[in-house]
Amino acid sequence: MPEDRLLERLEKLEGIVETTVQMLPPLIQDLSRRIDGLRGEMQGMEAKLEGRIQQAEAKLQGQIQQVEAKLEGRIQQVEAKLEGQIQQAEAKLQRQIQQVETKLEERIQQVEAKLEERIQQVEAKLEGQIQEVKNRLESLRQEVKAEINTAFNKTMLLFTLIGVALALLSLLR
């Protein structure tokens, strides 16, 4: 009878351990999917930024061409005045290019920082979950070990009692 209870408890514990082990792969796969999603988002952001850079370059190129065409038409009339305007236009374009570059660099750094933070959060969460599972498994292992020791002690006590009973019977005969 005690052996049946022990067997039942061992089977229950075995079921708990199997269930816990079966839960790990989906959690790991979910985390992997999330990390892949974050990587995809990062690539999407890179593509968007590349598109914006190309748009800015195209816009600046168009502006440069307009300024050059306008300046060429007026070169014969006011060469001294044009020289000043060219310098102003170049300075303005340089500032605009510098501003665009600065903004893009800042945005890229922000995105990288956010993604790094999200990855660290996901990693920390996964590590916590893994540690929790390890703790549960260790707890179950300790429980199973204690149950086995108890069962062993009871078995040894039973064998001792049987030995005493046999010794008493042999003395009484």
Image (cartoon, rainbow, N blue to C red):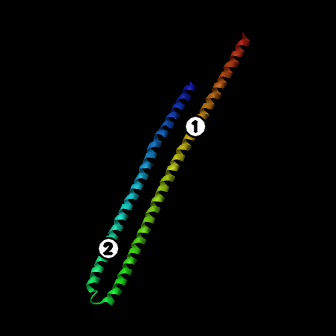
Name the secondary structure under disc 2.
Answer: helix
Residue 53 left/right relative to 154 = left
Nearer to me, 148 or 64: 64
- Disc 1 packing (10 Å; few <14; some 14–19; many ≥20): some
Q: Please tell me which residue is depicted at 52% across the width and 44% down the height of the picture.
A: 133
Q: What residue type is labelled 2?
A: Gln
Residue sitting at the far left = 73
Q: In which quarter of the image is the C terminus?
A: top right
- Disc 2 packing (10 Å; few <14; some 14–19; many ≥20): few
Name the secondary structure under disc 1.
Answer: helix
Image: 3 above or below 26: above
Q: How far across and how far down the image is residue 109, in percent?
A: 45, 65
Q: Residue 106 carries which label?
A: none
Residue 163 left/right relative to 135 = right
Nearer to me, 149 or 124: 124
Q: Residue 61 carries which label?
A: 2
Residue sitting at the far top = 173
Q: Please tell me which residue is depicted at 60% across the width and 31% down the height of the picture.
A: 148
Nearer to me, 70 or 93: 70
Q: Please tell me which residue is depicted at 51% across the width and 48% down the height of the picture.
A: 129
Residue that label 1 marks: 141
Q: Which amino acid does label 1 sit on?
A: Arg
